[in-house]
Amino acid sequence: MADELNASRVPESRCPSCFKLGDAATEIRNQLVQPQPGDFSICWNCGALLRFDADLTTVLAADMSELTDEQRREVERAQASIRGRRSPGASNGR
Ligand SMILES: [Zn+2]
């Protein structure tokens, strides 16, 4: 787990939704990209839509209105696969 492919190191921060600690980010198309403040992110544990704050910690994203339709579809696809993997059939907290 120490050297995941194409993961960028970011400051440790907890997912505001599930409180899982994370310190790496993987770009949605698996390209090596260093996250920038304001970039969207998805929690690898719960699938919450997040954004990088000015110090690159993650905060909950208010909504997806700034995303293009294509980006929105990618987010939804990623969330579906994360949530399907973690807890099949369960949808707590929505
Ligand atoms: Zn989470």
Image: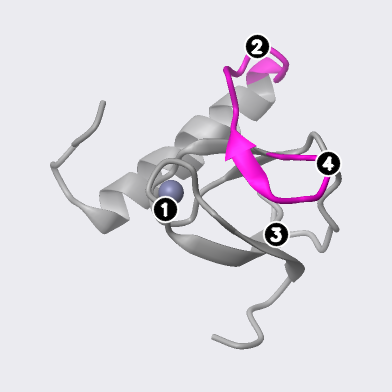
* Disc 4 within 8 angstroms of ligand 1 (CB): no
Measuring from the top left, give residue 69's x and y in whole percent.
65, 16
Q: CA distance from mark 1 to mark 3?
A: 24 Å
**Which of label 4 and label 2 is nearer to you?**
4
Q: Magenta stretch: give its range.
A: 52-69
Residue in front for this viewpoint, 50 or 77: 50
Crowd rating for badge 3 (residues with CA inside 10 Å; few <14, some 14–19, many 20+): few
Crowd rating for badge 2 (residues with CA inside 10 Å; few <14, some 14–19, many 20+): few
First-in-chain label (4 vs 2): 4
Q: Residue at x 77, y 50 (%)?
A: 56
* Disc 2 within 8 angstroms of ligand 1 (CB): no
Q: Which residue is mark 4?
A: 54
The secondary element bearing badge 2 is classed as loop
What label does residue 30 carry, if any? 3
Q: Which residue is mark 2?
A: 65
Q: CA distance from mark 3 to mark 4?
A: 23 Å
Q: Main secondary structure of the magenta part?
A: loop
**From the viewer's perspective, is 23 left or right of 86?**
right
Measuring from the top left, give residue 3's x and y in whole percent.
66, 86
Residue 9 drawn above or below residue 41: below
User: Which three-letter amino acid code belongs to the residue tagged 3?
Assistant: Asn
What label does residue 19 carry, if any? 1
Work out which quarter of the rendered image holds the N terminus and state it: bottom right
Instruction: Locate residue 10: give its quadrant.
Output: bottom right
* Disc 1 within 8 angstroms of ligand 1 (CB): yes
Residue 75 drawn above or below residue 6: above
The secondary element bearing badge 1 is classed as loop
Crowd rating for badge 4 (residues with CA inside 10 Å; few <14, some 14–19, many 20+): few
Q: Residue at x 20, y 52 (%)?
A: 87
Q: CA distance from mark 4 to mark 2?
A: 20 Å
